[in-house]
Every structure is written in structure tokens, then in C-alpha cells.
Image (spheres, rainbow, N blue to C red):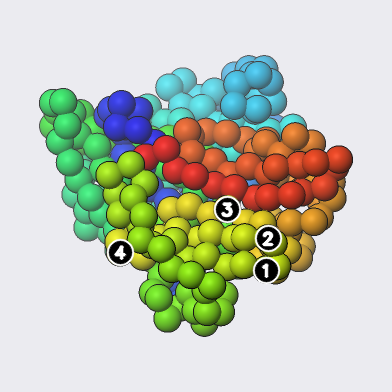
Amino acid sequence: MKKSHRLLIITFVSLFVGLFQLSAQDIEGVNLGTVIDDEYVQQKFGQDYSKADKETFFNCWYVYVYGKDSLFVDKHRRLTKVVLSSDRFAVNTNDVPGGIHVGQDVDVLLSANFDYCYLEEWENSIYMELAIGYNLGMFALNDKREISIIVMSEFYGDHVDGIGLNQKVSPEMIVSKFGNPSEVRSEYYWDDPVKEYVYRDGDKETILAFSEDFRMVHYSIGSSKFKTFTDHVPGGICVGDPIEKASPLFDSNGRLHYKYVDDFPYLIVENGVIKRIEYFSSD
């Protein structure tokens, strides 16, 4: 995500740490991805909502609107996005006692037990990066360093054999999980140094790229030996699979059903078969 897109927002993506995973992003205890209907919404969030048809907006089929707050639902009735501008609802109630509300000081974020936290002022605005979970979240701060807007969007956890984007690993963990690479290259993506771990399987090449602190920032998978998105598809999605197997996440052209950010994975498909699985950050 480019800095021009980060104005007044805080972004975070949560991570696996060993065998322990923090709770999924939630609003009032309801996790993103939960299947909901009118009755469920009334019981959990109240009856004073209006319902808007937003089929073309972020691939959401409709939205429950509570004044300044909106809950977005996809065609499978799954809660996929939350936008809050009032203090009516709390998020992250599974991880932060009492949850996080609009109007709270930024210290509620800084004091939480997140894996990564980064606060920066830029062009007279404040944004933050946090790491906790496998969903995308955004927070806007006002000039009093109070949370003014909260956005949560469903993201995708496991990207490559259990390792998520931006997950911090180690060289030993990479070798343990994937084996010894055919080659390790030092490269630059824009101005950022990265280590590319290259795995060759005959004429097929797979590249896993990691930042200086060994967070996965890019992959280009050409071999069927690597499994992706096992959190969402039994057995994962592999090169050589028919595109139909990837349908829970991707359309027939290999594009995500839900695209909330500039950076996202995609599939290269030929004659209905997955030929490559790609992710490249625009950061």
C-alpha cells in the first residue's frame, strides 16, 4: 500500500507465532467471515438498522447500516467488512479487554500485545502499522491522537505452507519448512533490500522473498510442491490444480473475489489450470 493511500489510516495484518494464533478480528465478538442474517444481526447488534444494496461495492451484496456504522455482507452472507465512525460498537474484543472503540486514545493500540507496532507522522497526519491477525484493519486518528474511524476487512491467513504475508520467520525456519534453496539472492525491491530464496523443480521456479527482518513480502510459485491458502481450501491451492478448486477465493480468471487493498495475490490460469501463484507488494 503506497503512502499516499495511508493518509490518516493505520494498517495491520496479524501473524502466526509458532503454533499460537491470536483471535480473528471481531466486532462485538462476531468474527469476520461469520455467516449472518437479519435475525442474527438484530440479536447481536440491534434492530435499528437500515439495509442497503451495495452489490458493486467491494463485492459486498448488501450492508447493514447503523447510523455512522456499516456492516458489509457478501453473497454467501458472510461478514466481510466493518466501517465504524461512532463509539457504538467495539472491535478486537477477543484480544483487548473491553475492545477498541472510536474515540479512544491511540494508547489503547500501543499498549496492546501486538507483534509489531509503528507510529509515524506524515504530512501533518498520523498513521500506524500494527501486526496481529490475518485480517486487514485500518484506523484513522484525529489531531488529538484519538481513533476517529475503524475499518476491518477480511483478509487471508496462510499464504504459503502456513506462512502469512509479513509473518516474521528466520532462515532456519525457511529451510526447515521448504528445504535448502537452490539459490539465495540479494535483491532490491524499489529501495528495500530483500533476500530471495529460489527453489527449482526441474524447469519450474519458485521465489520466496523476505525483508531484512525476514518477513515474507513476495512470492512467485511455479511448482506444485508448495501449498497456498490452506486456511480456506482443503488441501490448499497448488500449481497444476483446476481453477475450480480455488473458487472459494478466486474467480475463473484468477482474481480475488474480495479486493480491499492495492497489494493482493493472483493466479495465472491457462485452459482452466493454475500455472503460477503470485503476490507482489506495491509498497
Q: Which of the two discs, 1 and 4, labels the residue nearer the N terminus?
A: 1
Q: Which of the two discs, 2 and 3, labels the residue nearer the N terminus?
A: 2
Q: Which of the two discs, 1 and 3, labels the residue nearer the N terminus?
A: 1
Kind of residue at disc 3: Ser
Instruction: Tell me how far mark 1 sits from mark 3, CA to CA.
Output: 13 Å
The residue that disc 3 covers is: 220
Kind of residue at disc 1: Asp
> What residue appears at the point 54 percent right and 72 percent down from the top-left corner?
182
Task: Identify the image quadrant of residue 1.
Answer: top left
- The reply to whether discs 2 and 1 touch (Cβ–Cβ < 8 Å) is yes
> Where does residue 29 sit, x and y in percent of width and height?
51, 52
Mark 4, Cα crowd under 10 Å, few <14 / some 14-19 / many 20+, is: few
Q: Which mark is residue 201?
A: 1
- Compared to 123, does 34 lie above or below? below
Kind of residue at disc 4: Asp
> Where does residue 90 sit, x and y in percent of width and height?
40, 43
Where disc 1 sits, the SS reads strand
Mark 2, Cα crowd under 10 Å, few <14 / some 14-19 / many 20+, is: few
Q: Nearer the viewer, mark 4 or mark 3?
A: 3
Residue 32 appears in view: no
Q: Nearer the viewer, mark 4 or mark 2?
A: 2
The residue that disc 2 covers is: 204
Q: Which mark is residue 213?
A: 4
